[in-house]
Image (cartoon, rainbow, N blue to C red):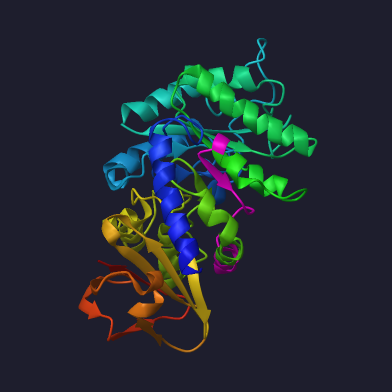
Amino acid sequence: MEPAVWKRLLSSVILGFVLYQSDVDGLKNGLALTPPMGWLHWQRFLCQTDCKNYPTSCINDQLFMQMADIMVSNGWLKAGYKYLCIDDCWLAPRRDKNNRLQADPDRFPGGMKKLVDYVHDRGLLFGIYQDVGNKTCAGYPGSRDFYELDAQTFADWGVDLLKFDGCNYGTLEDLEEGYRRMAMALNRTGRDIVYSCEWPLYARQESHVNYTEVAEYCNSWRNFGDIDDSWGSVKTIVDFTAALQEQLVPAAGPGAWNDPDMLVIGNFGLSYDQQVTQMALWAIMAAPLLMSNDLREISKESTALLQNQEVIAINQDPLGIQGYRLLKVNNFDLWEKPLASGALAISVTNRQEIGGPRYFLLVRAIVWEGLACDTCYVTQLLPTRYEFGYFNSSQVLKVWVNPSGTVLLRLE
């Protein structure tokens, strides 16, 4: 990005933060001033409703109560992961006699309010799923024609976050009007409910996305399809984000975030180096950190990575600038993210997938317009912590990066 563009971006983000704090810009709910963090069931547990044959992985109240307990007992809440989110397939096949949504009575015998109370009693916040169309992606009742009623229902249950999908929406006008109406309906309930949209994901299929408008109504939004538990999927999302960064980066900021989808760290498809890459780049991209894994059986190595406080601090930096791919050369990707107090986060990803570790020569002049600091103190945060020490404009830093791995640095 050209220096002048970076300066305009920084100025606009700072101004946006001030305006947002004064309730002039954005969704006007004052929420998600840093990217939301938590756990979401979809990628790992999908729409498994057969509790007889899959008792430990079906979508029922027991799964979410177990995850809530573990989020507290195993340090996830303390690390910042405060939202416990349910995705599609929690619903009964039909609304009740008053047209209100209801949970499946067999899998959630106490109803959704009981589960929300259980989650709140443990100090967590609760996220729920619905759809802008007449049916959810899995075929359950959607919110079309019931936006105000559903928003009030969620508020009555004590919901803290709504993931609003975009299946079965009808026309593009229906889609866009539905997202606007639900945003306003949530505001009118008087309850603080973070609004996570999939508006750009579906609208892009038919037209150019107006990110200024999306950011006026949504706290976060998906731009790409669902992530898979695979390195190929992670790479595709990263490359898509970089290809659209001239649109995506200026739209993001406190209260409004681009969402590249769930963290799949701790599952089956990524090597440890690839897990490091996802964690580092989701931090650089100021992405919502919503894990989708089984916290009952996650490894100590993956737990330590997801709970790394120095990496989380980059993601949660109050300046709220989304990082940007600065350079792509010799199968390396170089990303940077300006941080509060003049600090800078840098990631170097080795996109080569054969051979052994390779070195990347980092020259201070190529990052943050060469103005990061006169003499920077450099700390490597990932894959292991190491203090390089002071780094001035005449020096070259030799960074070794494993195949498909990433080195994450902080300069200050």
Identify the residue at image location x=71%, y=45%: 203
From the viewer's perspective, tell me whether residue 311 is left or right of residue 406. Answer: left
Foreground residue, 314 or 70? 314
Instruction: Look at the picture and state if 2 lies above or below 221.
Output: below
> Quick check: is 142 in the magenta stretch?
no
Region of the chain picked out in magenta, as a range: 216-237
Place residue 96 in its image quadrant.
top right
Q: Which residue is drawn at 47% across and 26% down?
A: 159
x%, y% of residue 134? 74, 29
Q: Can residue 265 be seen in this view?
A: no
Residue 254 falls in image quadrant: top left
The reply to whether residue 284 is visible in this rendering is yes
Measuring from the top left, give residue 404's x and y in whole percent: 48, 76
Residue positioned most to the front: 4
Q: Nearer the viewer, residue 230 or 33?
A: 33
In this view, the residue in front, 214 or 365, is: 365
Quarter the C terminus occupies: bottom left
Residue occupying the far right of the picture: 171
Residue found at the very far bottom of the displayed protein: 355
Q: In this view, does 343 lie above or below 203?
A: below
* On screen, residue 334 above or below 67: below
How many numbered dots are placed on residues in this image? Answer: 0
- Relative to 316, does residue 364 appear above or below in the rendering? below
Seen from the viewer's position, the closer of residues 355 and 316 is 316
- The residue at the point 32 percent across, 26 percent down is 121
Q: Where is residue 215 in the image (x, y as percent from the top left)?
A: 55, 41
Q: Where is residue 59 in the image (x, y as percent from the top left)?
A: 55, 37
Residue 220 covered by magenta stretch: yes
Quadrant position of residue 196: top right
